[in-house]
Amino acid sequence: MSQASEPNPAGPAPADTTSPRTARSRQIRLVGLTVALAVLVAALVPIVLAAGPPTRDELLEQAGMKGKQQLVIGVKDDQPGISQRFGNNVWKGFDVDIAYMIAGFLGFDHSQVRFLPIESEDRARRQARDNDGFVTVDLVIASYSINDKRVDEGAVFSSSYLHTEQSVVTLKSFKGQVSSLEDLSGRTVCSLTTSTSIQRLGEAGAKPTGRNRISECIQMLYDGTVEAVTTDAAILAGFVTGDRPDDSGQRFPVTLRNVKPLQHWDIGSSPQERWGINTGPNKALRDLVDLALYVSANDEEDSTWEDAYNTNLRWQQGYNLPQPVAEQQQPEARKVEVRQWPWERIALPAPAHPGSPATPPTRAVRVGWRGRGRRSSGC
C-alpha cells in the first residue's frame, strides 16, 4: 500500500458543530456576566468608600494639611541633644529630627518647617512665643511626657516616640551617693515647675525649687544655689556630656556660665517617661502622626528614628554612666487603619522626608535597655 493511501492515524478532524444560535447565546451570556460584574463593582465601591477607613489623602484634607505652606512646631531651645537653637536660627537635636520625620510624612520639606521655642507650662495649650506675642503651633514636640494630668489640661498625645526615665545630676565634686530621691533629703533640688517631680521631691524630704527652663536649674547648680537637679535622663545627659565630642567631632556649645563637671546618678526604680507629641484636638492630625510613627517603627527599610537616636543620644552614653540615657528601641505606635487599593500598597509606600538626605540602606538593630518605671513623673 502506498503511503498516500494509508489511513490518518489521528482520524479525521472533527467538524465545527456549533450552531450560530449557540454561539450567539454564549456571547449574550458573556456580555450579561460582564454587565453584572460592572454593576456589582459600581454598587460596592461607594459602600467601601463610605464604610471603610479614610485614605491618607483624606486624612491630610481633614487635618488641614492640604495646601498648607508651613508647619509650625513648638520645641525646646535649651536642651543639648534634644532640641537646641544655634546661631542663624539653626535647630538640632533628637526632637528636631523627629519633628522633621513627622513633617516629611505630612508632606512638608525642611524649608517648610518653622520651629518656635515653647515653655513647659505652655505645651498643653500649644502656645509658643513668636517675638513679642504667642502663636498656636500645629504640633508640640518638646520632651513632653504623657500623663493623665496633662490630658486633663487639654493635651492630646500621639503614641510615644521615646522612652527614658527620671534621674539626678549633681556636681562631680558632690560628697555622697545618690541612688534614690531619698538620698537628697534635706538638700535643695531644682526641677521644672510644671513637673510632678516637684511633688516627688517633697515626698522624699528634699527642698524642691522650680524653674520654667531646665537650663536655669543647671545654672543654679553651677552657681551653688542648689545641690542637685532632677528631670528626664535624656534631657540631663546633654548637660553632663557638655562640649565633649562624639566620634565625628560634634560638640554641644556651652552657653551657661561658671561651667563645672557633672555627675549623672541612676536612681533605680525611677518612673518611666514616655514622650509624646501634642497634636491638638484635630483627630485626623493625631491619626497621621501616629501613622507616621507606626510606619517608622515597622518599616525595616526606614532607619530615620535610629539615625536620630545615634546622632543625638547613643554616643552620649559613655559620658553618662551608670545612668542609661534612653531606650535604644523605638516604642511601638498605635496602628491607624487607612484605606489603600492593592496597587497602592506596592506602588505608593509611605512618603520619606522631602528634601532630606537619602535613608541609609541598612537599619540599626533595635535592641536596648527597657525602662524600669511604673508611673510617669511628667517632665
Image (cartoon, helix red, strand yellow):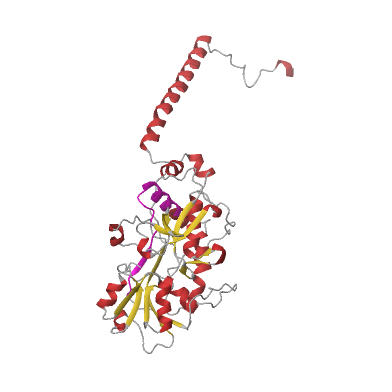
Q: Is residue 206 visible?
A: yes
Span colored in magenta: 269-292
Measured as percent of width and height from the top left, residue 21 is found at 50, 9
What is the total number of numbered labels drawn onto the structure image?
A: 0
> What residue is at 33 percent from the left and 57 percent from the top?
155
Nearer to me, 216 or 269:
216
Residue 283 in magenta? Answer: yes
Quadrant of the image occupied by residue 143: bottom left
Nearer to me, 256 or 268:
256
Give above or below for 68 relative to 219: above
Measured as percent of width and height from the top left, residue 101 is found at 50, 56
> What residue is at 28 percent from the left and 74 percent from the top?
200
Outermost residue on the bottom side: it is: 175
Measured as percent of width and height from the top left, residue 118 is found at 42, 62
Q: Is residue 365 visible?
A: no
Residue 226 in magenta? Answer: no
> What residue is at 45 percent from the left and 56 percent from the top?
73
Give above or below for 350 relative to 26: below
Outermost residue on the front side: it is: 132
Nearer to me, 305 or 370:
305
Outermost residue on the right side: it is: 2
Measured as percent of width and height from the top left, residue 51 is found at 35, 36
Assign the N terminus to one quadrant of the image: top right
Nearer to me, 89 or 233:
89
Assign the C terminus to one quadrant of the image: bottom left
> What residue is at 61 percent from the left and 17 percent from the top?
13
